[in-house]
Image (spheres, rainbow, N blue to C red):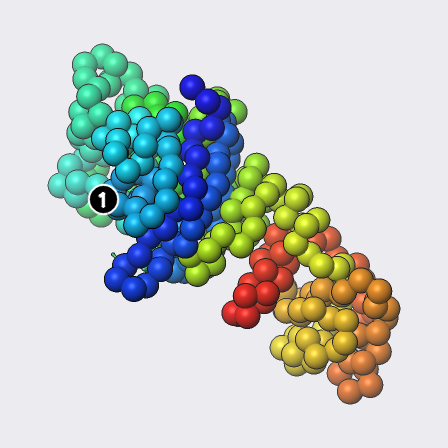
Amino acid sequence: MSDLVVDVRDLTRRFGSFVAVDRVSFQIPRGAIFGFLGPNGAGKSTTIRMLLGILPVSEGEGQVLGFDIRTSSEEIRARVGYMSQRFSLYEDLTVLENLHFFGGVFGLSGARLDQKVRELVEMTRLEGFEQQLAQGLPGGIRQRLALATSLLHDPEIVFLDEPTGAVDPALRRYFWERIAELSAAGRTVMVTSHYMDEVERCHDICFIHHGRLMAQGSPGDLKSRHLPGEMWQVRTSARAEVAAHLARVPGVAGAFPSGEMVRYLLEPGFDPAGPATALRASGLTCSAPEPAEPTLEDVFVALSRKRGTP
Ligand SMILES: Nc1ncnc2c1ncn2[C@@H]1O[C@H](COP(=O)(O)OP(=O)(O)OP(=O)(O)O)[C@@H](O)[C@H]1O
Ligand SMILES: [Mg+2]
């Protein structure tokens, strides 16, 4: 089999006349951590649902694990793990009962299932919660149980749709450690997220906006190819005013508050001191400009601007 676990071309999904996913093409090599990044409504979940054959494609084609997404959804679903954004657990079953139930759905039974459940209880740190009903479990535990249920059948690829959507930083870190572990063990992971900082850990990232693929590459590629200039920053107590003012200074391609700083993209050929001079001339105070390490957030702000949307 080819080393591409996912290979899609011109994937399109319409709901009536609305185009939710618009001619999206990408490939995921075996073992990669593939980040699918975009704001609310960008088309992330719709794309995953098409890859799994849950939602028919309107146009385009693709394979998952070599199976045609238009005709072989059963074969695909039997081989992939899926933690949906609004996953459902059986509320009146305990943690262990949920794991056994989902294991059965994937055709596991007997000693093999028991062994797998033990492994996953350990991996997802569910010890102590085994006999509790899903109903009433704290959010973080539910999230870990959902991850465990998606891994019961040792899937070659796992699709995690916003696993860190509403979880605290410790659990986010925990999820990313598990993702790295899965990838190190040769599994492929496709993960969607809103958080720019965490997708720095992906090997490859697609940024999707209004259903369209805006950019694709490794975090390093995206920073070097899609940032038309250098990032600078100033410290100020009037961040909103300074950002608004900077955005109008010639040579500044975008400015936005970030923490205690205002970051801005300076187009090539412009004097880095220019924006601060312009600020002071208008009575705003700020620190001397300092060069800033580019982040993926900078890339996405720049890309979103190109589309003319905030
Ligand atoms: N069944 C449906 N019928 C009509 N429109 C839909 C349907 N499912 C999704 N959409 C629309 O398609 C667009 C993409 O939705 P999708 O859920 O894929 O976005 P997303 O990137 O996953 O967003 P989020 O980050 O909020 O989960 C949205 O505008 C959504 O309202
Ligand atoms: Mg979604």
**Residue 233, position as x, y percentages in the image:** 74, 65
**Residue 38, position as x, y percentages in the image:** 47, 55
Residue 219 is left or right of residue 80, and the answer is right
User: Which residue is more in the foreground, 248 or 116?
Assistant: 248
User: Which residue is more in the foreground, 275 or 197?
Assistant: 275
Q: Is residue 85 visible?
A: no
Q: Is residue 269 visible?
A: yes
Q: Is residue 111 above or below residue 31?
A: above
**Residue 207, position as x, y percentages in the image:** 51, 51
Q: Residue at x 70, y 69 (%)?
A: 253
Q: Residue at x 59, y 43 (%)?
A: 217
Tally the marks. Answer: 1
Q: Quadrant of ligand 1?
A: bottom left
Image quarter of the N terminus: top left
Question: Which quadrant of the view contains residue 91?
Answer: top left
User: Which residue is more in the foreground, 50 or 117?
Assistant: 50
Q: Residue at x 62, y 62 (%)?
A: 302
- Crowding near the residue tagged with mark 1, few <14, some 14–19, many ≥20 C-alpha atoms within 10 Å: few
Q: Is disc 1's CB within 8 Å of ligand 2?
A: no
Kind of residue at disc 1: Ser
Question: Which quadrant of the view contains residue 104?
Answer: top left
Give the residue pinned by disc 1: 88
Residue 231 is left or right of residue 182, and the answer is right
**Residue 199, position as x, y percentages in the image:** 54, 45
Q: Is residue 33 above or below residue 283?
A: above
Q: Is residue 291 above or below residue 89?
A: below
Element under disc 1: loop
Please, which residue is most extreme toward the top here? 111
Q: Residue at x 59, y 65 (%)?
A: 306
